[in-house]
Image (cartoon, rainbow, N blue to C red):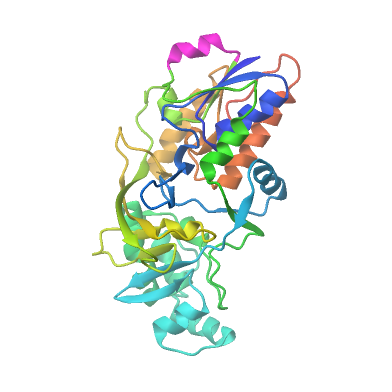
Amino acid sequence: MDILIVGAGFSGAVIARELAEAGHRPTVIDGRDHVAGNCHTARDPGTGVMVHVYGPHIFHTDDAEVWDYVNAHTPFRPYRHSVRTTVRNRVYSLPLNLLTINQFFGQTLRPDEARAYVEARADTSISEPANFEEQALRFVGPEMYEAFFKGYTEKQWGVDPRELPASILKRLPLRFSYDDNYFAHRFQGIPGAGYTALIESILDHPAIDVHVSTLFQPEMTDRYGHVFWSGPLDGFFGYAHGRLGYRTLDFERFEGTGDWQGCAVMNYGDRDVPWTRITEHRHFAPWESPEGSVLYREFSRACGPDDIPYYPIRLVEEKALLAEYADRAARTEGVTFVGRLGTYRYLDMDVTIRDALDTARAFLDRAPGAAMPAFVTPPL
């Protein structure tokens, strides 16, 4: 079958490869002038630094099949993600761990002492946190909430933390040890040649036809037996019911000499500092030693019609609108929606690949004549 895949990021590339190896001839299009979507990496000609063009991407997973899959296309190098935060003119370790607690409170607590110390500051009157702020107050108490979460969250999401669901904070660890490895997954790394080389390898199959700088046109669907859409779900329907909410990022690039900040990511928790973090890209390839350095200041804001969507908001109003689009998608034949934008979910790279593999296999395993669902993993 001739198949159209819209989007040359992880979702589109993995689906295309799986279908091509099964005998189909997928065509992949992307509106940008490169593959790999927001994971795109490029060597900076002036400094030699491998830059994560749309912000840093750290691969981490417990899914052994996904780990083997990406390593089969390009070798990954070991990488341990280390993050710091500047708050009130002091630098602290993240995620919150025993060092952070002792630094912040000026203590020398052992793990069991620190656990009791934090619990004594937590608001135990909150039994069922209804929002982000209540979850934080129950989690770490007012002092650490004000320092490490409130200002950063207001900048990142553009709303009062009381308007955000408690589930956002539940994903963040609190460790009563000195372990500051940002992720706890078994497999962690970054492709030595960059993410774009990884996606190019996945797409490197004689049956796959790739076209960049090519925008989707609705009439294209008439020429293909099936369409896999990894663009915005609402965009496929021309935003007929309104636009789903996203946050976007602005990057203020600057250069330095040598090691400028000493770590890959420095968060800034104070509300009066306009950026959320500074990323230093040389640290995402610690096996290299460039003389120069490329850094990004990141600014989060509401996503406009011409902006790149990064983070789905998924608050009450967006979920209601999502339900409308999901219902319309379910009634649309010949199209399957995939990826972060197509399913309006916040997905890490490993989950994106897992969903793409599952989607391709569901397509290939269908009974003859059976319809392919709009979503293999429902967005709600």
Q: Residue at x 52, y 9 (%)?
A: 222
Name the image quarter holding the N terminus.
top right
| Near-viewer residue (354 or 77) | 77
Please say whether residue 222 is one of the residues in the magenta stretch. Answer: yes
Residue 249 in sight from this viewpoint: yes
Count all numbered tags in the image, as a single digit. 0
- The image quadrant of residue 317 is top left
- Image coordinates of residue 2 in percent, x first then y, are 62, 14
Q: Is residue 108 left or right of residue 89?
A: right
Residue closest to the far left: 272
Segment colored magenta: 217-225
Q: Is residue 364 left or right of residue 143?
A: right
Q: Is residue 118 left or right of residue 192?
A: left
Q: Residue at x 70, y 17 (%)?
A: 370
Please say whether residue 371 is one of the residues in the magenta stretch. Answer: no
| Near-viewer residue (85 or 365) | 85
Q: Is residue 104 left or right of residue 59?
A: left
Q: Residue at x 67, y 59 (%)?
A: 186
- The image quadrant of residue 154 is bottom left
Q: Residue at x 37, y 75 (%)?
A: 91
* Above/below status of 217 relative to 146: above
- Image coordinates of residue 149 in percent, x first then y, are 38, 66
Residue 166 in sight from this viewpoint: no
- Image coordinates of residue 65 in percent, x first then y, are 72, 46
- Image coordinates of residue 260 in percent, x first then y, are 36, 66
Tell me the chief SS of the magenta region: helix
* Above/below status of 180 relative to 367: below
* Above/below status of 192 relative to 175: above
